[in-house]
Amino acid sequence: EGWIDVVALDLQGLMRASVQSGEDKAAQSLLNKLIRSNLVNTTHQVEVLQRDPNSPLYSVKSFEELRLKPQLLQGVYKMGFNRPSKIQENALPMMLAEPPQNLIAQSQSGTGKTAAFVLAMLSRVNPANAFPQCLCLSPTYELALQTGKVIQQMGKCYPEIELAYAVRGNKLDRGHKLSEQIVIGTPGTVLDWCTKLRFIDPKKIKVFVLDEADVMIATQGHQDQSIRIQRMLPHDCQMLFFSATFEESVWKFAQKVVPEPNIIKLKREEETLDTIKQYYVMCNSRDEKFQALCNLYGSITIAQAMIFCHTRKTASWLAGELSKEGHEVALLSGEMMVEQRAAVIERFREGKEKVLVTTNVCARGIDVEQVSVVMNFDLPVDKDGNPDNETYLHRIGRTGRFGKRGLAINLIDSKHSMNILTRIQQHFNKKIEKLDTDDIDELEKIAN
Ligand SMILES: Nc1ncnc2c1ncn2[C@@H]1O[C@H](COP(=O)(O)OP(=O)(O)OP(=O)(O)O)[C@@H](O)[C@H]1O
């Protein structure tokens, strides 16, 4: 009792969409994939825009209805999939229809997009032809490998189909012609393999997949390279375009590479503060904030909590202080590899650590359901020092699906931070109550 396991997680800059570089976005996406072992549940509806509004709108509730090749159906079940996910219900019949149809699809990460287009590629391949027929573009080497893994798993019972990786470092002899039916790679290398090196004949491609388009366009040059590749493909090549988000730039990109598309959108549930009890604690210094935190831990039972600090320095200081107090502290910082961060988040999700200290929005899309308390050791501010309402909402907000009651505690140490808090309160028009962490009775009240 009283022992706090602390993970100081440093994902600084990783989650701010507006300032995110392609590298950060790719790292975030990879992090999500490494952590995820299940589908993300979605309760909201899919929006479908059909190119031909007169043709019947198909959706399927089972994989059998898709009339997949038996080897593929077997592969799907071997992966533990029982029924199509929400996006798959609508996307799969469209992707597998004859004649092939183009698709632009947007839904948050973890909803089954990768599995959907992998199934489409595997279905369209003719194993008797020993040349590339499906081409999939990924933003980075690591993301290409992740998708490759899904292809291999799903195609496990279909050994005639082979896969090649068109990624930097994969050197082939001059004059080589690929015999693998599916090629997955990054835009630069794929472009070279289709043009200068001629390892791939783009005219023979039947299915073109552009994955993680939002990450793609955040990387300099990727968009143009992708468009150049697309231009080399035959007119009847099926174009499939996937993205987790759909801002204007992504949408414009989609329209450039996907003629006559069907469109599927699955909106992410909005977070709200409705089920959250929000408090603030007046302190005078960093040390007092630390003391307030200790008081809280001393008097209420906290299953799992996340603590947000403004800087990496504060996060590691906090981890150090907690460790001096005899608490078990694990520190995870920005220098760490994505895989190492994933491992820490994984441990936290499994409940091996009870507290996660982080410097920024702990990975949007990384939902740790069991977190009941979120503490802002520092309030979120943008680079001009103004309240960052969006980040505040993402830190403490809950979506409908995790609509459990939550507790948010803001530690205030100056007039300035009190002013930020007031503005956040005004923005959301939700009262943030004052809390005295020296008053045991008051603390017990909030716990219920
Ligand atoms: N029909 C299904 N039934 C059960 N699990 C599924 C199904 N489809 C996909 N999954 C699993 O759900 C997780 C997320 O799926 P997938 O990677 O395809 O989503 P995604 O939308 O492509 O996410 P991202 O954008 O992060 O790649 C994976 O672990 C995958 O194996």
Image: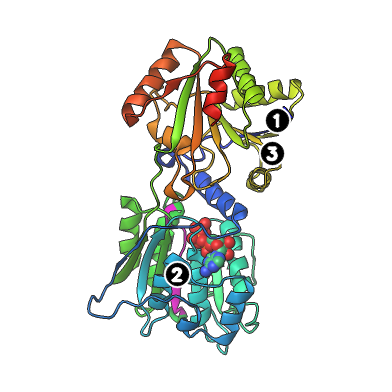
Relative image position of residue 409 (x, y in whole percent): 51, 26
Q: Amino acid at mark 1?
A: Ile
In x, y percent, where is residue 247?
Answer: 34, 50
358 is higher (above) or lower (below) than 296 = below
In the image, residue 271 lies in the stretch drawn in magenta: no
Q: Do tag 1 and tag 2 residues touch (Cβ < 8 Å)? A: no
Give the labeled residue for mark 2. Answer: 88
Q: Which mark is residue 4?
A: 1
First-in-chain label (1 vs 3): 1
Q: Residue 388, relative to residue 245: is it above or below?
A: above
Q: Which residues are magenta?
A: 205-214
Q: Is residue 190 visible?
A: no
Residue at image coords 48%, 55% = 109
Q: Position of residue 238 (x, y in %)?
A: 39, 76
Q: Secondary structure at mark 3?
A: loop
Q: Nearer the viewer, mark 1 or mark 2?
A: 1
Nearest to N terminus: mark 1 or mark 2: 1
Nearer to us: label 2 or label 3: 3
Residue located beneath label 3 in the image: 353
Residue for point 74% across, 27% down: 327
Residue at 40% across / 20% down in the picture? 420
Tell me if the residue at label 1 has its CB under 8 Å from ligand 1: no
Give neighbour class at mark 3: few <14, some 14-19, many 20+ (Cα, 10 Å): many
Q: Amino acid at mark 2?
A: Gln
The image quadrant that residue 60 belongs to is bottom left
Q: CA distance from mark 1 to mark 2?
A: 42 Å
Quadrant hosting residue 278 = top left
| Alpha carbon distance from label 1 to label 3 | 8 Å
Does the numbered disc 2 mark a residue whose Cβ is under 8 Å from ligand 1? yes
